[in-house]
Image: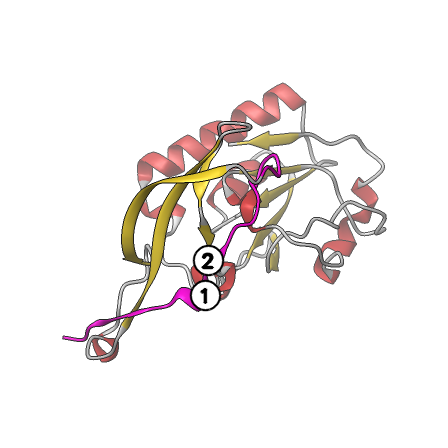
Amino acid sequence: MGGFALAVGDRAAIEACIVCGSAEVEPFLALGQMALANKFLTREELSGDEPRFDLTVGFCHECSHVQLTRHGSPARMFEDYLHISSASDTLKDHLWDLSDVVVQRCGLGEGDLVIDIGANDGTLLKGFRRHGVQALGVDPARNLAERYRDPEIARYTGFLQLSLGRGDPGAVPSRRSDHRHQHLSSHPCPAGVRPWRRHRSRPGRVVRH
């Protein structure tokens, strides 16, 4: 069996609270060096060193937000991702129930578009497609994009960027997300989103799940 390699260089220490920008973030819980979740080693990798990262939790005295004091590389964490939503029947049922609720409350139909930020294998979007709603998934996991292709669901393989929806004619405002806001960065709107520009003139809603 291999040992572990502390990969400090892949994690940048935060200089300010990720919510309010305050510098008053105090570390209060050190969990030591941890391997990445869902990064199971292959047989060939067992004899090598497994990268581990410092995991310390901090408290912001300004806004009371609890956060990690070092941020990992989003690419390392999410571009090869092993968790799939459809592996759990309970989760699939929950996501399809969510799509039913959103369609009903927002009155969505064939002329509307739902963007799922962190789409994973497209389970939630398949729920919306049952109602005829147009669907676009945004997710950086390249392995999931290759494995779960669906001709009825458009997909952008990459990270959502903050500039999406600011001035670019291809941007669209309607979207659903969960906990991935901490990985956003500034970048031009991805070309793969541009075919959906016809939806931009319509008001959108954000459903954070």
* Secondary element type, mark 1: helix
**Neighbourhood count class around disc 1 (C-alpha, 10 Å): few under 14, some 14–19, many 20 upward:** some
Query: Contact, CB < 8 Å: mark 1 with mark 2?
Result: yes
Q: Residue, x 56% and y 51% (percent of image)?
A: 183
Quarter that holds the N terminus: bottom left
The mark that comes first in sequence, 1 or 2, is: 1
What's the residue at 54%, 42% (across, down)?
125
Q: Which residue is mark 1?
A: 10
Q: How is the image coloured?
A: secondary structure
**Separation (CA) of disc 1 from disc 2:** 6 Å
Q: Is residue 14 magenta?
A: yes
Q: Is residue 196 above or below residue 199?
A: below
In this rendering, does residue 147 appear at all? no
Q: Which residue is mark 2?
A: 72
Q: Residue furthest top?
A: 105
Image: magenta residue range: 1-22
Is residue 188 highlighted in magenta? no
- Could you tell me residue 61's position as x and y percent? 50, 29
Horizontal relation, residue 204 to residue 15: left or right: right
Q: Nearer the viewer, residue 196 or 165?
A: 165
Check disc 1 and give the amino acid type.
Answer: Asp
Can I make out residue 11 in this image?
yes
Q: Nearer the viewer, residue 21 or 141?
A: 21
Q: Estimate the x, y position of residue 138 in percent, counting from the top left.
A: 59, 52
Left or right placement of residue 46 versus residue 139 in this view: left
| Category of crowding for the residue at label 2, using alpha-carbon neighbours closer than 10 angstroms: few (below 14), some (14–19), many (at least 20) | many
The quadrant in which residue 173 appears is: top right
Kind of residue at disc 2: Gly
